[in-house]
Structure formats: structure tokens, C-alpha cells
Image (cartoon, rainbow, N blue to C red):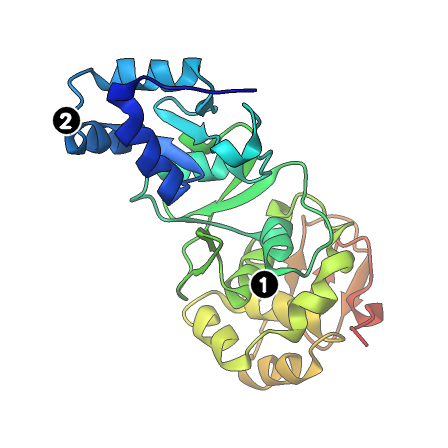
Amino acid sequence: MTRTISKSFAGILQELELERPLLVTSEQLSDLKKKHHVTSSVEVVAARLKAKGWLLPTDRQGVWEFAPAEVAGIYSTNDPLLCFRTFQAKYPAVKCALTFQTAAWVYGDSDRIPSSIHVSVAEYKHARPLRGHTLVLIFRPKLNTQVISNIPVLARESIIVQMTTKPSSVSSWVSVPEWLPDFCTQLSSDRIFEELAGRPICVSQRLGYLIQRLRPDIADEVKKRTEPVSNAWFGERKRTLRYDKRFLVADSLLPFDPKKLEGTK
């Protein structure tokens, strides 16, 4: 398929081809049209580029996917994280990052990405614009986020603390044993305790219980630093599936026994 563009818009398209952005926002188009002395409005520029197949629609108004010439047509990249990228492009100042299995997939610890993208936001007010193909969770990490392929991802230590802060927020504990062993090999003890600092003691209890087989070194250190005075529930207060005397954890949620998880070879 041959895609063309009028001479007046050629400078804009040439710069987009050089930069190869995955996404283009209305603000970026505004800057480009000023730079290349295009008098047409942003709406007209976007409409022309869309009509010729250079810009593809996304689920976010004012944000488009760029289809460079090399794809030989108006084809999307089908990036599974596109919905999150468009949110970032629209709201660059919002503190958010991938978490749980989605983050594990980005880190390379999971072979598959979940059907719903797991996103952690620091403020509840930012959760609503992210609804849709995402599972939004409220969490304020103490460690800096990592940036992988231009996407913010919670640090591994932040993720494991988030999982044990509110276990019910994990959408599928059934799939966790698929990626948790590889994920835990990269955990740092010092960073774990930096993330745990100031949090309720029950979070430490649940964390020690969860990783005791996969990272006994960290679990032992958690035990040394933790002096629980009451039981910590892993799940709702209902029929207990198993009880851990070492960390005083009553587990009513996990579909697996953490003591039986197999680490990576």
C-alpha cells in the first residue's frame, strides 16, 4: 500500500519518520506544525495524517499510534502495553508503574502477559482514567521505579511488598508460581527492608511466609527483625487453609503452599 502526504505536511512526516515514536500526542503535533511553519490546525494535521494511514487511533483522545513507512501499511504494532503507553503519553506527570505479573513479563520472569494489564498508581484520583483493559491498584512505593523500554515498572522489591500488603489485590494467585521463582532470585535484602520500613508488621509476616522457600536468606532476616504479637491473615478471616507458626500467618487465600515452591535451577 502506498501512503502519501501533501507537500505542506512533508516536514512533519519526515521528522516523525526520523524519530520513530510509538505514539504521537496532539501536543507533539502542535510543536511540529509550529516548527515546520504549518498553518493548519492540529485537528486538520491529525485528520490528514490519519486519513493517509500515518496515524492510527488509540483508546485515548489526542493520542495516536504512529505507523512508519517500514511497516508497509496502516498496521498497528499490537503492543500489549499500548493502552498503558497511551495513558502515559496523555498524562506524563502521573506517578504510575506496571506491577505484578505484567511487570514480571517485562522483567522477563513470566512467559506470558495477563489479559488485564496490572498498573500501580500512587493516588486514587488517577485510577479512574486508567480503567478499561487495566487492573488499577493503589500503592505508594518507597523505592524508585525502573524504566524498561520507556515504561515505568515497580522495583521487584516494591512489587513483593505490594503483594503482601494487600494479598487480595493480586488477581490470580494461581499463576504466581509460574513467575515468582525467577522473580525472587533478583530480590535484594537491603531494598526489601527499605521498602518495608514504616509499614505494618503484618506485611513483613506475610512476606516472610510467602518467600521462605524461594529466598530463605531474606525470610530468615525478616524473622530476626520481626516480632509479631498476633496472627497476620493472608486473605480474608475465614476458614484457614494452612497456618505457619514461624511467621504467625493464617493463610486462607493461597492455592499453593509457599513451603513447597520450587526455586529456579
Task: Please state the horizontal and vertical placement of residue 124, each as a whole percent of the image.
Answer: 39, 39
Q: Amino acid at mark 2?
A: His
Q: For residue 210, say whether it is visible.
A: no
Task: Please state the horizontal and vertical placement of residue 171, each as a whole percent of the image.
Answer: 66, 43
Q: Quadrant of the C terminus?
A: bottom right
Instruction: In the rendered view, tell whether residue 50 sits above or below residue 97.
Output: above
User: Position of 51 compared to 30: left or right?
Assistant: right
For label 1, the SS is helix
Q: What is the spatial separation of the Cα atoms under label 2 and label 1, in whole angstroms?
A: 51 Å
The circle drawn on residue 160 is 1
Identify the residue under disc 2. Answer: 37
Q: Residue at x 23, y 32 (%)?
A: 32
Number of other residues with Cα within 10 Å of mark 1, as a class: few under 14, some 14 to 19, many 20 or more: many
What is the quadrant of residue 207 in the picture? bottom right
Q: Residue at x 42, y 60 (%)?
A: 141
Q: Nearer the viewer, residue 102 or 15?
A: 15
Instruction: In the rendered view, tell whether residue 194 sits above or below residue 249.
Output: below
Q: Amino acid at mark 1?
A: Ile
User: Position of 29 compared to 60: left or right?
Assistant: left
Q: Are marks 2 and 1 in contact (CB under 8 Å)?
A: no
Q: Quadrant of the N terminus?
A: top right
